[in-house]
Image: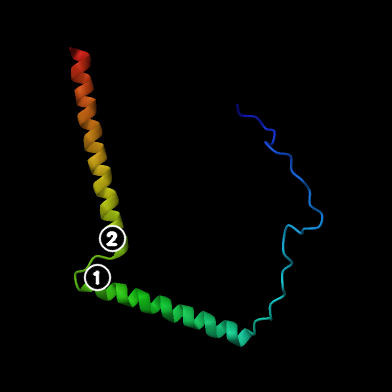
Amino acid sequence: MINNTDAEPLRPDSSRNPVDPVQPKSPVDAIEADRFSDMMKKNKDMEAAASDNQAAEGEITPEELQRQIREGMFKTGFQKAIERAKEMTKEMKQ
């Protein structure tokens, strides 16, 4: 039987804090933040260049592979649905 009552009553434990206190972090310098963002931009540029090189060499990018798999699964599922619909219409005619 499903209902909204708890299986066991909750026991409030006042001696235990449910959330640990958060320790303050040191502030981030603006120079350090700029340096980090520059590194992230360079990393993204390097990844984009690497994927362009792979695509230029005839290799498939992961995005293209995922798209092809998705299209193949859709086409297969669609064809099976069409075949099943044809079978059902034949059965209904009989």
Point out the image quarter for the N terminus: top right
**Mark 1 and mark 2: span between their CA atoms?**
10 Å
Seen as rendered, the residue at the extreme right is 14
Residue at 72%, 64% (x, y): give it: 20
In the rendered image of this protein, does residue 47 appear above or below residue 13? below
Q: Where on the picture, by quarter, is residue 53?
A: bottom left
Instruction: Please identify the quarter of the rendering in which residue 25 is found.
Output: bottom right
In the picture, measured across the screen, residue 67 lies left or right of residue 2, that is left
* Residue 93 in the figure: left or right of residue 6: left
The residue sitting at the top extreme is 94
Q: Categorize mark 1 by other alpha carbons within 10 Å: few (<14), some (14-19), many (20+).
A: few
User: Which quadrant holds residue 74?
Assistant: top left
Q: How are the colours assigned in the image?
A: rainbow
Residue at the spot x=22%, y=73% of the render?
Answer: 56
Crowd rating for badge 2 (residues with CA inside 10 Å; few <14, some 14–19, many 20+):
few
**Residue at position x 76%, y 59% from top?**
17
Identify the residue shown where x is 74% and y is 67%.
21
- Secondary structure beneath label 1: helix
Asked if the residues shown at circle 1 and circle 2 are in contact, with their CB atoms under 8 angstroms apart, the answer is: yes
Q: x, y (%) of residue 64?
A: 28, 60
Q: Closer to the camera, 80 or 6?
A: 6
Q: Position of residue 57 (x, y in %)?
A: 20, 73
Instruction: Look at mark 2 in the image and give the residue it sits on.
Output: 64
| Three-letter residue code for mark 2 | Glu
Identify the amino acid type marked 1: Ala
Question: In the image, residue 54 lies at what x, y percent?
Answer: 25, 73
Quadrant in which the C terminus appears: top left
Q: Which residue is mark 1?
A: 55
Q: Residue 16's x, y, as percent?
A: 77, 58
The disc placed on residue 84 is none
Q: Secondary structure at mark 2?
A: helix
Name which of mark 1 and mark 2 comes first in the sequence: 1
